[in-house]
Image (tube, rainbow, N blue to C red):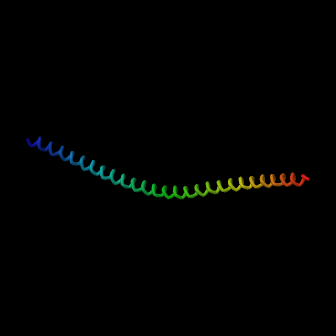
């Protein structure tokens, strides 16, 4: 019976060693996942800040483009109205 007990004890020691190894690996995995999560959170915060800046820049660009186009349109309308006013003045001056 001594041989069987020694064999069982040896197998139990191997099982405990394997469990300790698996526990250490599980703890390393959890630690790694926490670090990855932290890095991801930091990057998301940085990305959020960059999107805020980009949103502000994009808003400014769109407003500038719209104002530029509106100013150009206003200039063209004024030129057309001035030309029409000149034509009307010429026709009125030509009448007796």
> Residue 88: x and y, percent?
83, 52
Identified at 74% across, 55% down, the residue is 75
- x, y percentage for residue 35? 38, 55
Q: Residue sitting at 72 percent across and 55 percent down? A: 74
Which residue shows up at 45% across the image and 57% down it? Answer: 45
Residue 57 lies in quadrant: bottom right
Q: Find the residue positioned furthest to the front.
A: 96
Measured as percent of width and height from the top left, residue 28 is found at: 32, 52
For the residue pair 75 and 42, the one nearer the viewer reads as 75
Q: Nearer the viewer, residue 73 or 20?
A: 73
Give x and y (percent) for residue 17. 23, 48
Left/right placement of residue 70 relative to residue 85 reads left
> Which residue occupies the extreme right position in the image?
96
The residue lying at 56 percent from left, 58 percent from top is 56
* Image-based side of 47 in relation to 17, left or right: right
Q: How many marks?
A: 0
Towards the viewer: 19 or 63: 63
Q: Of 39 and 10, which appears nearest the observer?
A: 39
Q: Quadrant of the N terminus?
A: top left
């Amino acid at each position: 019976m001594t041989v069987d007990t020694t064999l069982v004890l040896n197998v139990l020691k191997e099982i405990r060693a394997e469990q300790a190894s698996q526990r250490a690996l599980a703890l390393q995995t959890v630690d790694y996942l926490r670090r990855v999560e932290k890095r991801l959170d930091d990057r998301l915060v940085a990305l959020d800040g960059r999107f805020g800046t980009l949103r502000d820049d994009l808003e400014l660009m769109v407003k500038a483009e719209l104002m530029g186009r509106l100013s150009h349109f206003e200039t063209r309308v004024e030129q057309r109205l001035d030309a029409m006013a000149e034509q009307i003045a010429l026709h009125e001056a030509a009448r007796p």
